[in-house]
Image: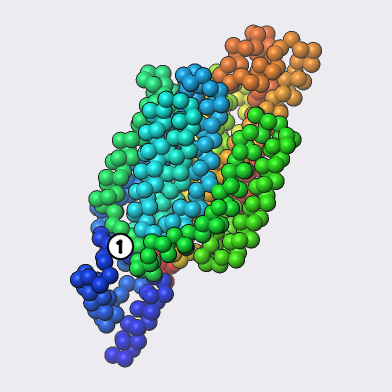
């Protein structure tokens, strides 16, 4: 009897130390009848020794059908922001034509990416401090508002502002999806849930250009943004009805002003300009201005100064920091962030530049080049689904990260052998092989975050991993563009040393316009030059995929099953 009582006290003590998130459908007023009932219930649990000490017990307060419905709503949220990242690509020419603004072409995408990256850590902090359900709903609403502004925009400036607003909402959706999964799903099945995010993300990323082309051709480019409204409305409705409010007990009674103080606004005031400086330099460098232009150098110097100041300030904040040092310096978190950074670079480089290759070398149109990515996407989908199941069964994620770091470089390396005469079977096979490698490893860093961090630190860890992927995409797309331009210029000058072709026009032309610009007798040499330039871009992807091995070998070998039992 004494032993049982000690066991009960120990379990309650552990539960208090862990402070798991509490699900509740209403916010109780202190001192009211419901507050008395809540205290009575807590005392009853403490006396009986039946308090939950595992996150799984907290999660299973939702029925499986309800979990399934919420899961589908989260997939819709992922589909929204992933689709929005790529659907505009084929609509840009029509947008530029309607508004007579060439600047709109670049800023349609960069304004979205800029705010997504800049506000990522802020949302991670908000999810740690405020009700996770309400935060996600607000993020989706911001995204929907931005989409509506884009759909009805009368000028290019309004369109760009709408894209920036939608990017803020995207920042909240990306990290919020992982945070909500951590709240409501048992740890042992989170690998499957997170793998489905990779599937939805990859499918939407490829469908984006195809749907964008269809809407622009048959309706209007504005439907690229109108399409978000019904999906977003459905997602908000389902989450309102089926997702309970989620708040940590330690912050349930904290006032709104005290919660605002926990947001580390000074740190964010340093971090956001730092990210903006970096992304502006990447956006303008090599296109609007040369890389050695004073404005680009100034932006990069400003980024360096601000990021050093940000890290120094965050170290002084301790556990209240937006970028908690105890989280980012944890071995598995650091490894996961590196792995996500490398994987993000590979994924964005390939989804962005394989269509370039298909349009330039194969002569595909924009919609067909999107369909041409299907082998890559199917590889991601199949392997993400399989690995999610295998991690759930075995409990271990590290072995699959290592396998991904071997498989992906093989496929990415084989892609560098593409020539203008490469048979379709090789194009399909190499894409599928790379897709299998990326599908195996892309979402496992988030699984590691869920396994190694206590629940209160998961929002920060998840947002850091998402930020590393987002920044990686921005950085390597810009690097890829610089490599493509420089290599193409050098190859064309080498192929036509005596002139006879308008090299400047070819450099500024779209991939699908090469055949119409080059004369019939020169088109073969132009295609060889373009293929060689794209090979340089694919080499970057191969190197980055190989570098994932550093993170894969550094990550701790932990089992989601054992971690769940210990919690």
The residue drawn where x is 30% and y is 45% is: 236
Image quadrant where one finds the C terminus: bottom left
In the displayed orientation, state which residue is furthest to the right: 498
Of 403 and 126, nearer the camera is 126
Left or right of 261 on screen, residue 1? left
Image quadrant where one finds the N terminus: bottom left
Of 309 and 116, nearer the camera is 309
Q: How many marks?
A: 1
Of 35 and 180, nearer the camera is 35
The residue drawn where x is 58% and y is 61% is: 314
Q: Name the spot of residue 132 as percent of width and height, x first.
A: 37, 56
Residue 82 vertical position relative to residue 456 in the rendered view, above or below: above
Of 530 and 177, nearer the camera is 177
The residue drawn where x is 50% and y is 48% is: 119
Left or right of 313 on screen, residue 487? right
Question: Is residue 2 among the parts visible in the rendering?
Answer: yes
The colour scheme of the drawn protein is rainbow
In the displayed orientation, state which residue is furthest to the front: 257
The residue drawn where x is 65% and y is 12% is: 518
Q: Which residue is mark 1?
A: 23
- SS for dot 1: strand
């Amino acid at each position: 009897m004494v032993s049982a009582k000690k066991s009960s006290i120990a379990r309650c003590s552990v539960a208090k130390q862990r402070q798991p998130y509490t699900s509740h459908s209403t916010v109780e007023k202190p001192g009211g009848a419901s507050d008395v009932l809540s205290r009575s219930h807590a005392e009853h649990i403490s006396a009986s020794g039946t308090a939950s000490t595992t996150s799984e017990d907290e999660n299973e307060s939702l029925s499986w059908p309800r979990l399934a419905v919420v899961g589908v709503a989260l997939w819709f949220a992922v589909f929204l922001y992933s689709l929005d990242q790529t659907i505009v690509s084929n609509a840009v020419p029509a947008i530029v034509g309607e508004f007579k603004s060439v600047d709109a072409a670049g800023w349609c995408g960069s304004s979205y990416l800029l705010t997504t990256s800049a506000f990522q850590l802020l949302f991670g902090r908000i999810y740690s401090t405020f009700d996770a359900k309400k935060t996600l709903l607000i993020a989706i609403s911001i995204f929907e508002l931005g989409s509506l502004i884009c759909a009805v925009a009368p000028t290019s400036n309004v369109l760009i502002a709408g894209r920036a607003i939608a990017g803020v909402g995207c920042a909240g959706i990306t990290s919020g999806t992982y945070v909500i999964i951590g709240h409501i799903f048992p740890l042992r099945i989170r690998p499957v849930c997170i793998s489905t995010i990779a599937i939805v993300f990859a499918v939407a990323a490829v469908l984006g250009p195809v749907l964008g082309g269809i809407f622009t051709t048959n309706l209007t480019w504005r439907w690229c943004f109108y399409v978000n409204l019904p999906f977003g409305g459905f997602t908000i409705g389902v989450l309102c009805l089926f997702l309970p409010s989620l708040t940590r007990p330690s912050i349930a009674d904290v006032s709104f002003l005290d919660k605002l103080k926990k947001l580390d606004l000074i740190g964010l005031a340093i971090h956001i300009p730092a990210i903006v400086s970096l992304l502006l330099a990447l956006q303008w460098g090599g296109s609007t201005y040369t890389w050695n232009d004073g404005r680009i150098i100034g932006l990069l110097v400003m980024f360096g100064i601000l990021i050093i100041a940000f890290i120094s300030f965050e170290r002084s904040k301790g556990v209240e920091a937006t970028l908690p040092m105890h989280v980012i310096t944890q071995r598995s978190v650091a490894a996961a962030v590196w792995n996500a950074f490398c994987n993000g670079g590979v994924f964005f480089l390939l989804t962005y530049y394989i269509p370039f290759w298909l349009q330039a070398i194969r002569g595909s149109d924009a919609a067909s080049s999107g369909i041409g990515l299907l082998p890559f996407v199917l590889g991601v989908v199949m392997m993400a689904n399989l690995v999610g199941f295998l991690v759930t069964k075995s409990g271990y994620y590290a072995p699959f990260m290592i396998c991904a770091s071997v498989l992906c470089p093989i496929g990415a390396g084989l892609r560098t052998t593409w020539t203008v005469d490469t048979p379709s079977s090789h194009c399909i096979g190499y894409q599928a092989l790379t897709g299998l490698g990326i599908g195996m490893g892309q979402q496992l860093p988030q699984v590691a975050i869920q396994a190694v961090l206590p629940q209160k630190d998961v929002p920060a860890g998840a947002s850091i991993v998402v930020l590393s992927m987002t920044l990686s995409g921005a950085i390597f797309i810009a690097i890829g563009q610089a490599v493509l331009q420089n290599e193409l210029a050098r190859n064309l000058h080498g192929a036509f040393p005596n002139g006879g072709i308008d090299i400047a026009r070819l450099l500024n032309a779209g991939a699908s316009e090469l055949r119409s610009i080059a004369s019939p007798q020169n088109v073969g040499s132009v295609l060889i030059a373009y293929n060689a330039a794209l090979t340089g871009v694919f080499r970057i992807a191969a190197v980055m995929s190989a570098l994932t091995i550093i993170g894969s070998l550094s990550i701790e070998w932990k089992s989601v099953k054992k971690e769940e039992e210990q919690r």
